């Protein structure tokens, strides 16, 4: 091997698993890093120089070229090269080089995080290739208590793990770091920001898993610590808490409180003065996300014009910032509004735009959600063959990812199609699958919806006794969690009363609930029967 290769290859002792030839010259092109590199190795290299050196190493069997710019490192090589580096240079020089590389990966994580907005496919590929190096430098940041760089790298890794649906890996990484920082977050502003990020990520995961109480407790914990420590420059963290509390209030159908929290979060983010353009863009995207949440809340209430107004505000910001990933979410939201209003052609165009973006950036989980929505729309049009095709595409992805919660939506749709086609055994099997998952997830709205359609399936078979039992369970859930649906559930019970007669109705009610039907409810059901 050439003298130049022997001199520079020990630098690879600070890397793990892969070397990206495009990354190496970037390190020496930035003054802060190039001076340190030149002091140790005598010169800074261009991309062509690194290509020549790495190709020499590949020919010698030390590296393996696996793509045009990526080289795989033998697992034993970094240890050996690190030993060579330590023999040739002082401990202080090696430590200083390692620290600069740590800062460099913090910068790389920040840049990739920003590119996840406008060039998501490129940033995704870089982060996936550099995952092992980011993890190695993240561990170093923990040891050296470089909390700000740790947060930057963890945030970038978290974004890619979430988009790739690597939930368990991200959780394990967070848990390891939070054990390290949990007793240190009072030491500095940077440590607290990392702690708050970790806690907020846990709250978000709890929310996604329908553990609303845990999510609420975590957000309240962050809020209490923010008030107690009273650190400066915590507006972003405060806004995150406000947004989290808004989502929890929305889930509890306390829409007024939810909107108050969302508006607070917007005002806080708008008050932040950012000189850096990238920081301004990031802040604007956070505001757009809140507009999207406000739109979704209006959408759930059936206020479609209000929802569209918020979605269009968010879309304008995302387009201005070239945030194609954010645009995809809005296209999906707008598609759902159009399809619920039977504007199927417009809905299809929106869904198609969203799907193209998600497929381009490799977000298969979100692609599956679009397939599900396309299936729902085909089902509404009674095009059951097309609906089955889209549902099965969605189901394959959800089942491969073991994403049972979203799979339950597909089971529900397949059950509804089977019910419509008179295949009641298949319909019941699908509803049972959906119900078990939704019950485990504590999603009481969806549990009630499944019970309702299952009850209708039993009615279609004139199985009045079992249908009534199902409707009683649905009523009990809605009485506690979904009071706006009570009127509809009373009508279901009224139909059972008409079919069964008063005596049989009372007997089944007693068997299911172990008590008589309350007088006030009884009067409502009897009145509804008389109006059928």
Image (cartoon, helix red, strand yellow):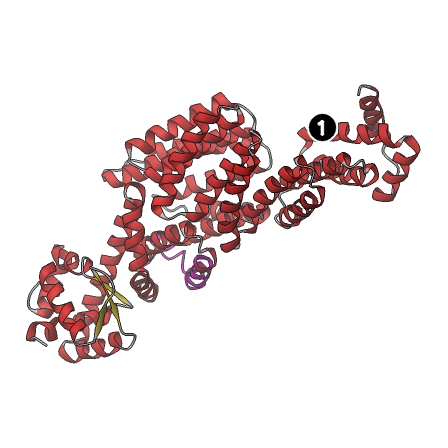
The part of the image, by quadrant, that contains residue 502 is top right
Q: Magenta residues: mostly which secondary structure?
A: helix
Magenta stretch bounds: 170-191
Q: Does residue 316 show up?
A: yes
Residue at the spot 20% in from the left edge and 59% down from the top edge: 68
x, y percentage for residue 153?
A: 32, 56
Identify the element where label 1 is drawn: helix
Q: Position of residue 290 (x, y in %)?
A: 43, 34
The answer to whether residue 446 is left or right of residue 52 is: right
The residue that appears at 40% across and 54% down in the rendered structure is 161
Q: Categorize mark 1 by other alpha carbons within 10 Å: few (<14), some (14-19), many (20+).
A: few
Q: Where, quadrant-wise, is the N terminus in this rendering?
A: bottom left
Q: Residue furthest right?
A: 503
Find disc 1 in the rendering and name its residue: 488
Q: Seen from this angle, which residue lies furthest top?
A: 531
Q: Quadrant of the C terminus?
A: top right
Q: Nearer the viewer, residue 188 or 34?
A: 34
Query: Which residue is at the front of the view, 473 or 222?
Result: 473
27 over 420 or under it: above or below: below
Q: Residue at x 55, y 41 (%)?
A: 388
């Amino acid at each position: 091997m050439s003298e130049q290769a022997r001199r520079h290859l020990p630098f690879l002792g600070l890397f793990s698993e892969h070397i990206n030839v495009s990354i190496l010259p970037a390190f020496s092109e930035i003054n802060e890093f190039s001076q340190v590199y030149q002091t140790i190795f005598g010169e800074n290299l261009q991309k062509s120089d690194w290509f020549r050196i790495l190709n020499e190493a590949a020919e010698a069997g030390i590296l393996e070229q696996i793509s045009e710019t990526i080289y795989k490192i033998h697992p034993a090589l970094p240890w050996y090269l690190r030993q060579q580096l330590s023999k040739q240079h002082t401990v202080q020089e090696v430590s200083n080089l390692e620290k600069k590389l740590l800062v460099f990966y913090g910068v790389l994580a920040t840049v990739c995080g920003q590119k996840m907005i406008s060039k998501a496919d490129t940033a995704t590929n870089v982060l996936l290739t550099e995952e092992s190096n980011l993890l190695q430098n993240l561990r170093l940041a923990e040891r050296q208590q470089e909390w700000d760089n740790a947060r930057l790298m963890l945030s970038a890794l978290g974004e890619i793990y979430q988009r790739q649906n690597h939930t368990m890996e991200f959780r394990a990484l967070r848990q390891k770091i939070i054990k390290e920082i949990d007793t240190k977050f009072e030491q500095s502003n940077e440590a607290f920001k990392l702690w708050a990020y970790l806690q907020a990520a846990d709250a978000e995961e709890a929310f996604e898993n329908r553990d609303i109480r845990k999510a609420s407790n975590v957000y309240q914990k962050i809020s209490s610590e923010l008030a107690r420590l009273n650190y400066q420059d915590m507006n972003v963290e405060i806004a995150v808490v406000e947004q989290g509390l808004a989502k929890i209030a929305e889930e509890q159908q306390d829409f007024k409180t939810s909107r108050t929290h969302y508006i607070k979060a917007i005002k806080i983010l708008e008050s932040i003065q950012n000189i850096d353009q990238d920081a301004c863009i990031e802040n604007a995207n956070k505001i757009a996300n809140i507009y999207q949440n406000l739109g979704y809340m209006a959408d759930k209430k059936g206020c479609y014009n209000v929802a569209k107004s918020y979605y269009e505000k968010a879309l304008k910001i995302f387009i201005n910032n070239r945030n194609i990933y954010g645009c995809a979410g809005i296209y999906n939201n707008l598609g759902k509004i159009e399809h619920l209003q039977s504007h199927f052609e417009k809905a299809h165009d929106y869904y198609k735009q969203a799907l193209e973006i998600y497929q381009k950036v490799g977000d298969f989980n979100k692609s599956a959600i679009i397939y599900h929505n396309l299936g729902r729309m085909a089902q509404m049009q009674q095009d059951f063959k097309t609906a089955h095709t889209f549902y099965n595409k969605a189901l394959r992805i959800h089942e491969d990812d073991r994403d049972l919660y979203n799979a339950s939506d597909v089971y529900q749709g397949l059950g509804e199609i089977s019910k419509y086609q008179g295949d009641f055994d298949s319909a019941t099997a699908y509803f049972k699958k959906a119900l078990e998952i939704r019950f485990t997830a504590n999603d009481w709205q969806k549990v009630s919806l499944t019970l309702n359609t299952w009850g209708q399936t039993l009615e279609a078979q004139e199985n009045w006794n079992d249908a009534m039992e199902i409707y009683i369970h649905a009523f009990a859930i809605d009485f506690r969690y979904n009071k706006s649906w009570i009127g509809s559930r009373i009508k279901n019970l009224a139909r059972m009363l008409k079919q069964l007669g008063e005596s049989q109705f009372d007997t089944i009610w007693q068997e299911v609930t172990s008590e008589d039907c309350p007088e006030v409810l009884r009067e409502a059901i009897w009145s509804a029967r008389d109006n059928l």
